[in-house]
Image (cartoon, helix red, strand yellow):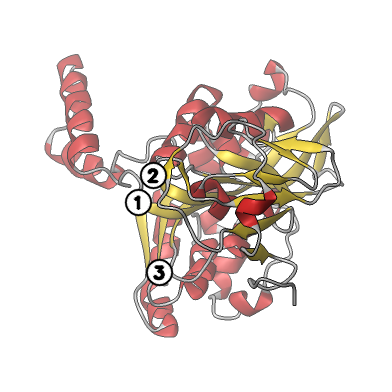
Amino acid sequence: MTVEAGVLERYSAGAETRQADLCCPVDYDRSLLALLPQEIIEKDYGCGDPSRYVKSGNVVLDLGSGSGKICYMAAQLVGETGKVIGVDMNDDMLALARKYTAEMAQKLGSDRVHFVKGQIQDLALDLAAMDAYLQKNPISKAEDVIHLRTWQEQQRKAAPLIADNSIDLVVSNCVLNLVRDSDKTQLVQEIFRVTKPGGRVAISDIVSDEPVPEHLKQNQQLWSGCISGALQEHEFLQAFLAAGFIAVKYDKWETQPWQVVEGIEFRSVTITAVKPQNEPCIDKGHAVIYRGAFSKVYDDEGHVYLRGQRMAVCERNFKLLTSDVFGNDFIGIAPMTESEGKLWDCHPGTIRAVAETKGGVYQDNNCCNTTSCC
């Protein structure tokens, strides 16, 4: 049995009856669960709560949406101006999630949740459209496979399931580990493709402290149970960096492993990351001060920030470093009067002269955005 077939079979069973061994204990926001039908809650399988990262107005994509629990939780947070898309390849899970769309739309006050059929490692291919194609063009000989591949390529280009640069926040709850190893690089690249410049990801998943040996990967029960397909903890972060994301970090990390198999610890984590803005680096006189406690830190684009120094940054990086992505690590200083701006190579380690920033507007997440701390 292939990885995909094993996963389909086990989660189809999970849509029928609850599979207690498919999920870790998670402390979800009870106020968001209150609106949800009990069946959706009971037949959801996850290891984290990425809905905590949803903001009002977001377009959210949930990878491997299953029963729809995270989607319906996120829908309460995006508000009337937002939208939530759940993608899953399992017809039984999609049927379960769609069973309650009308009821939830009435409770939410608008129809803002939509479920689509697709594989998360190929977010351009619409599997529902492929099902319709195959009904009209059944495969009976090798030549038909070639025609199907041609149709797939045309469909990806002409009508992708999820368009390029269309998603504010990509979330997932314990699903990336279910994708076969040979597709994991493509999976993360697809996440990067659909995320808007400046958009974010929040992925809850299972990681291992050591690489998983091949004999465990061949165990279908362990794979479909979110164990043997887990990425090693460092490789998980590196996969997102390699795809082009920045500010990649473990935002949550369970100190106690969920399971230990042959001495290998498997635990629940949540990573967050940002897709860089697709805009030039313009110097308008902004600066940031790295608070510490380290003598200096580097970001994923090679910039260095010295503790306590007014480091010159472009307008784009200023917005990122003073956002909630970095919490309270940086104090931002916007110039009192912005210059017209000029293209800048963001030379690492450039210190902004105090004279250039004196009297500027401080942006400090510990205070308020004024010239003096509140």
x%, y% of residue 262? 84, 26
x%, y% of residue 275? 49, 43
Q: Secondary structure at mark 2?
A: helix
**Residue at 66 percent of width and 59 percent of height:** 358
Find disc 2 in the rendering and name its residue.
194
* Mark 2 neighbour density, 10 Å: few (under 14) some (14–19) many (20 or more): many
How many angstroms separate mark 2 from mark 3 (CA)? 17 Å
Image-based side of 290 in relation to 84, left or right = right
Find disc 1 in the rendering and name its residue.
166
Q: Which sits earlier in the primary sequence, circle 2 or circle 3? A: 3
**Residue at 81 percent of width and 40 percent of height:** 259
Question: What amino acid is labelled 1 in the image?
Answer: Ser
- Which label number is shown at residue 82? 3
Residue 69 occupies quadrant = bottom right
On screen, residue 253 above or below 235? below
Q: Are marks 3 and 1 in contact (CB under 8 Å)?
A: no
Depth order, front residue of 208/283: 283
* Mark 3 neighbour density, 10 Å: few (under 14) some (14–19) many (20 or more): some
On screen, residue 374 above or below 68? below
**Residue at 50 percent of width and 54 percent of height:** 66
Q: Are marks 1 and 2 in contact (CB under 8 Å)?
A: yes
x%, y% of residue 57? 43, 69
Question: What amino acid is labelled 3 in the image?
Answer: Gly
Q: Which sits earlier in the primary sequence, circle 3 or circle 1? A: 3
Q: Secondary structure at mark 1?
A: loop
Q: For the view shown, which residue lies furthest in the left direction?
A: 136
